[in-house]
Amino acid sequence: MTDAFETLAIHAGQEPDPLTGAVVPPIYQTSTYKQDGVGGLRSGYEYSRSANPTRTALEDCLAAIEGGVRGLAFASGLAAEDCLLRTVCRPGDHVLIPDDAYGGTYRLFARVLADWGLSHAVVPIGDITAVRERLATRPARVVWAETPTNPLLGVADIRALADTAHAAGALLVVDNTFASPYLQQPLALGADFVVHSTTKYLGGHSDVVGGAVIAADAQTAERIAYHQNATGAVAGPFDSWLTLRGIKTLAVRMDRHCANAMRIAGMLAEHLAVAEVLYPGLPTHAGHKTAAAQMRAFGGMVSFRHAAGEQAAVATCGRTRLFTLAESLGGVESLIEHPGRMTHASAAGSALEVPPDLVRLSVGIEDPDDLIADLRQAL
């Protein structure tokens, strides 16, 4: 099959149904499968926690569009992260995490896996020297990266991170949720694993929750699959079908998300009520050159700091009409939120605490002039 992303997104893992010729994979809404005699499985299916044909189609597609050897679909992004970490780490291991990361990821490390015996240290993941020095001080099993980061839109050099992690005997995991596989291919740049909240850009329509791990190594992928089955936080067949449907239009949606976000970032950069705009597409962004080198475009997420402080930021979030005040991101509709009080409240008081005057935008695919007008009146 072609290597073209747009073609893989529509066809990988999604051959027409051999029974009916249906061009869209069926939703196999079943928990179990008839066996042809004891142990006589049809295509390896016995129970839908272990495997389901709709989920298999999604997992094959995920592997293809991320350039991995195997994809595994989960009930949520955090379920994917938890399964991966419990597979590759053991109690007593150490992990480096970004000083800017999704609040749920921080909560998983700080308040769940810490009790399991997995320690972590916080490092500015875009500073390769700082990462190298921290690894020299204490070896780590995993270097965990987001790029761009959530919610400050920091950018890390994935190839340099991979080289640094591997030289120290660590694995590199990249959360590719903000970029999506269309904009960025971490495995091709040396990462060992990619994780996603498929709830976001991959699903793309704010109607499904899911997660994924894509692995570069077949042996480790098999171990993750064992844990996936053993712990059971798998994507259901209808969730898998919805995510597959979203992936088909990922490329065209991301083109519009990126174009709209660039226009909005430019407007915000000139607005007197805005103290700072955080968007990798702006030449003034510290990670602009790195992002330009490893991303197809700069994404649909924009954050900014309100010049008048926290209360003004909160008030702005409440005054928009097209931007919906809501958590999550990556859907076709535009969303606005106050990270300090919403998605990143769990990081309050930690090294990952976000500025109180920060506003995060998930820029949708509406008319850009309408979105800009909405932000202007809200500001």
Image: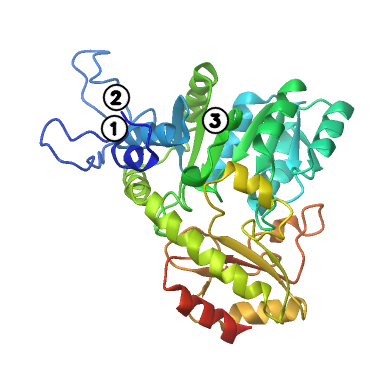
Which element carries disc 3, helix, strand or loop?
helix
Nearer to us in this view, 336 or 4: 4
Which element carries disc 2, helix, strand or loop?
loop
Q: Earlier in the sequence, mark 2 or mark 3?
A: 2
In the picture as drawn, the residue positioned furthest to the right comes out as: 137
Look at label 2 and name its amino acid.
Tyr
State the count of labels. 3
Q: Residue 125: percent from the left, percent from the top?
A: 75, 42
CA separation in Å, label 1 and label 3:
28 Å
Q: Would residue 10 appear left or right of 316 to someone viewing this image? A: left
* Residue depicted at 23% across the width and 33% down the height: 15
Residue at mark 2: 45
Q: Is residue 322 visible?
A: no
Bin the neighbour count of mark 1 within 10 Å (Cα to Cα): few under 14, some 14-19, many 20 and up: many
Look at label 1 and name its amino acid.
Pro
Residue at mark 1: 53
Nearer to us in this view, 290 or 128: 290
Q: Earlier in the sequence, mark 1 or mark 3?
A: 1
* Residue depicted at 67% across the width and 72% down the height: 269
Residue at mark 3: 188
